[in-house]
Each structure stands twice: as C-alpha cells, then as structure tokens.
Amino acid sequence: MSESSSHTQPSPAASAAQGVSALLNHFWRPALSILGLILIVLLVWPLLQWAVFDAYWAGSDGSACPDKAGACWPFIAERFDQLMYGAYPEAQRWRVNLGLTIGLIMMVPILIPRIAGKAIWVSLFIFVYPLLAIALFSGGVLGLSPVGTSSWGGLFLTLVIGVFAFVFALPSGILLALGRESRTPVIRILAGIWVEIWRSVPTLVVLFVAVIMLPLFLPREYEVDKLLRALIALSILMSCHIAEAVRGALRALPAGQFDATRALGLKRSSAYMHVILPQALNISTPQITNIIIGLFKETSLLVIIGLFDLLGMVQAVSGDPEWHLSSARATGYLFVALIYWAFCFGLSRYSAFLEKHNRTPGSY
C-alpha cells in the first residue's frame, strides 16, 4: 500500500516545481501578448500617422503636397485612371470594364464549391473567355477600333497577365504532372527534363529570353507581340511549378486509392479523371494558391522589359515633373502594396475556405 501511494503522490519538490510552472504559464502568455501589441503599435503607428493623420487629401497638382511629412493622396486621385488602365484610350475603357466584368461573372460559379454544371463553366472560362477578352481588349473585330498592347498598363495589365497565365498554366501543368507519372519512359523523361529546365531558371531570365533573345532566332518577317511573348514565358514557368505541386499530391495519395480503382475495374484514364486527380488537386490547393500569389506579384518584373503594369505605371507617372515628389512616389508604392495585399489575402482566404470545405472525416 505504501509503495503504491508513493507512486501516486508527488514529492514536495515536484509539487513546488509544478506550482512554479503553472504560475509562469499563467503570467508569461499575457505578458507576451502585451509585448506583441506594444511592438505592433510602435511599428504601425508611424505608418498610420504618415498615411492618414498627417496626409494631404485635397488638391490637383504637386503644390497640394508641400512636404514629405504626410502621404500625397491627391497624386493617386489625379493619376487613378492611368494606374488602372495605363495608356488605354479613355473612350474605349468601357471595353476593359466589360471584359473584366464578364470574366468575374464567369468565375462566380467556378468559385462556388459543388455547384451543378461546374465543368461547363470551367470549359467556357478556359476556352471561350480568352478569345472574347482578346477581341474586346485588342479590337479590330466587330467594329471595335484596334488598341495595341503597348497601350495596355496599370492594374488592367496585371490582371490580364495573371488571369491568362493561370488559365493556360493550370491544364498544361496537370498534363506535365501526369506525364512525369506516365508508365511510358520517353514521356516521363521528356516531361521531367522540360519541368526541371524551366524551374531552374529565374523568372527575370525567362522574361529576357522571351522578349529580347527570342526575336533574334526568328525570321525578320515574323514579329511576335512583346506582351504575348511575356505571357507565354510566364505561362510555361507557372505550368512547371503547378506540375510539381500536382505531382507531389499524386505521390501523397495512399496506394489504396489506386488499388480501389483497379478493383472497381476502372481504366487508368477514368481512374485518374474521376478519382485520383480530384483528390490530388484538393491536396495541392494550398501550394497552387501560393504559386498563383507568387505569379501575381512577379508581374511587377515586367517593367524591366518595358511593360508598365501597376507598379511600373506608378514609377512612370511619379516621374512627371508636376508630381516629382518623394511623398507622391511613396504614396504610390503604398497604394500598390495595398492592392497587392488585398488580392493576395483574398486568394489565401479562398484557399483556406476550400481546404475547410473539402476536409472530410478521416481525410489524409
């Protein structure tokens, strides 16, 4: 009896140690929370004071911001159209608005989980919407006046590159992933070489090769649009990253999934289409979302090759002598950062929503 009681009752020293540990746990967490709040205030308050409380809000030229003590929001208000559309003709901007609105409407049923006819909407968005959007944005058809891609810019150009690159990269990335898992050695080796080459090259180098070096290898009578070259390069690069994300998800699936499809008598193609790929895409959703966010942010590199996306347009318009102020450029960078954050945060929240919605009891 005494031996069993000695095991159940801790010694006085152990009891004291447990008491001290409980006391520390009771105080250190609130202390860390308070310390964290203090750090946030110390970091955020100066930015908030510069961007809001000491900012300049009214005016139509540089004289509205006499010093750099506060943000220069009149600069954003006066150059807002350029930041959104670039040099796209003002009288034709309704085509941009219409094209982006149609794309947004077509994406709604795609983004809703488990909606009837989703495959039809996905097919329309991948195969029909790009043609419709190009016709609206470029013109030259249906009586629309042509607008060259050199006039495209701002947030409009950023969205075009991000959406179009993803539309082309997702299906090609899935095909590359299946190619790397193919039973045919030639297909598997070629897909692996293609993916590894492109994944090993920095994005900036890919853009330089596509925009500057590619025309050197083409006949003089062939001239490929600069935006199209950049779009193809980013699509290829993004498809290779998506391929690796999907391939990793395919490898993560339990072997029992493949055995079950064989036991049901499904062909390999049907098994992948209806059983394997849906699960793999569900597993790879966070990584694919991260790839999309990375691509959306890397569109800012286009300014180096002469394409003025949102960030490039801020740099261009802030060089105007009328607004050649450090506060104007800093305000422009803050405006761009807020837009990028809003899009990227929205994508990450939607990814988390999909993960939560698709999570089932006993999932892997």
Image: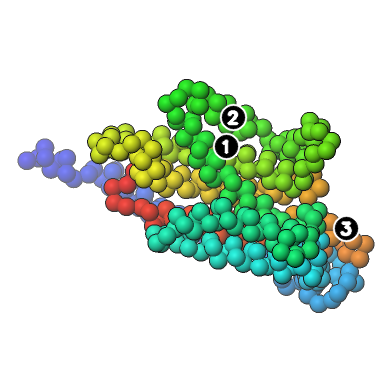
Which residue does the image show at 84% across and 60% down from the upper left?
317
Q: Where, quadrant-wise, is the C terminus in this rendering?
A: top left
Which residue does the image show at 78% across and 75% down from the upper left?
57
Mark 1 and 3 residues: CB-CB less than 8 Å, in contact? no
Kind of residue at disc 3: Gly
Residue ID for mark 1: 240
Comparing 219 with 186, the one in front is 219
Residue ID for mark 3: 319
- Asked if residue 166 lies left or right of residue 254, the reply is right
Q: State the image coordinates of residue 25 (x, y, percent, origin top left).
A: 40, 53
Residue 27 vertical position relative to residue 295 in the rendered view, above or below = below
Q: How is the image coloured?
A: rainbow
Q: State the image coordinates of residue 58 (x, y, percent, origin top left).
A: 81, 77
Which residue does the image show at 28% across and 35% down from the upper left?
262
Kind of residue at disc 1: Cys
Q: Residues within 10 Å of mark 3 (few under 14, many from 20)?
A: some
Which residue does the image show at 48% across and 63% down from the upper left?
109
Mark 3 and 2 residues: CB-CB less than 8 Å, in contact? no
Kind of residue at disc 2: Trp
Residue 338 vertical position relative to residue 294 in the rendered view, above or below = below
CA gap between label 3 and label 2 equals 41 Å
Residue ID for mark 2: 194
Q: Secondary structure at mark 2?
A: helix
CA gap between label 1 and label 2 equals 8 Å
State which tag comes first along the sequence, 1 or 3: 1
Report the mark closest to the observer, 3 or 2. 2
Comparing 290 with 196, the one in front is 196
